[in-house]
Amino acid sequence: MKSFSNTYIFVFSTVMVMLVATLLSFVAEQLKPFQEKNVEIEKKLDILRSVGIARDIDDVDDKDTFVEEEYEKNITKSFAIDGSGQLKDDVDAFRVNIKAELAKSPEDRTLPVFVFVDEQGSEIYIMPMEGKGLWGPIWGYISLEEDMTTIFGAIFAHAKETPGLGAEINTEWYQAQYLGKKIFDDAGKFTSVRVVKGGADPADPHAVDAISGGTITSVALQEMMEECLGNYETFFKNKSN
């Protein structure tokens, strides 16, 4: 039986590793535009769903085309602001990475805003959110009515939350609780929306039910909303005056 020297085996293994690495790099580079497009479509879909559009996306034959057309038709404008609520020129709001912005100090953050006009001609303002759940990242979008305090719609998603428990944040029944809730109290103080273990008082405009068995994820979502929407507090107040 022919034997190979250690040098031969080492050289052969090194060459094979380099060939495989090169091939994987080439494939990844070729797939990158498709991956970026998928991320863009999912982001546009979440923005649409936050105002009640495209929730029946599973019934659509061509998802990408549908989302692109609905986004173009319904999201009338977008812009970015700084931590003091001032407009930031020459910033593409759609390209702002909210996770990266939250890692900065509040005064250095760039905050995106998306605008939808409802059937009555009222402008609805949409803001992104990003946070940490029990097992991984959670994120979502909140839309507000023109009074800048009443929640028009909400969409939440997660990466690794427990099925049947924390994962319930991305279900319609849970998200529907937020509709009509208010993020400012009657005195104009920012309150966001808190989750209540055991059930919130239906008459409380600032509270929703926590998920049974998923309290940690519910609280994480509460903290996400409070931090992310808190960044927009000055903008909300200026816009409502």
Image: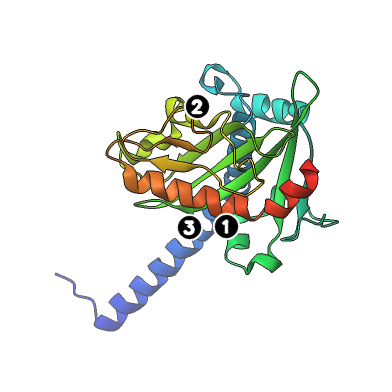
Q: Quadrant of residue 66?
A: top right
Instruction: Identify the amino acid type marked 2.
Output: Ala
**Pointer 3 residue:** 24
Q: Is residue 105 visible?
A: yes
Alpha carbons under labels 1 and 2: distance apart: 25 Å
Instruction: Quadrant for the N terminus, please.
Output: bottom left
Q: Label 2 crowding class (10 Å Cα cut-off): few <14, some 14-19, many 20+?
A: some
Question: Residue, x 71% and y 31% (percent of image)?
Answer: 71
User: Which type of secondary structure does the marked residue at label 3 adopt?
Assistant: helix
Question: Residue, x 35% and y 33% (percent of image)?
Answer: 199
Instruction: Identify the amino acid type marked 1.
Output: Lys
Nearest the camera: 21 or 16? 21
Taking 103 as reference, is 240 left or right?
right
Taking 17 as reference, is 180 left or right?
right
**Pointer 2 residue:** 176
Give the answer, above or below, for where 205 lies relative to 27.
above
Instruction: Identify the amino acid type marked 3.
Output: Leu
Do the residues bearing badges 3 and 2 touch, measured as CB atoms within 8 Å?
no
Q: Nearer the viewer, mark 3 or mark 1?
A: 1
Nearest the camera: 195 or 213? 195
**Pointer 1 residue:** 99
Q: Quadrant of residue 82?
A: bottom right
Q: Residue 226: percent from the left, percent from the top?
A: 54, 51
Alpha carbons under labels 3 and 1: distance apart: 28 Å
Question: Residue, x 30% and y 83% (percent of image)?
Answer: 7
Q: Is residue 30 visible?
A: no
Q: Label 3 crowding class (10 Å Cα cut-off): few <14, some 14-19, many 20+?
A: few
User: Which type of secondary structure does the marked residue at label 2 adopt?
Assistant: helix
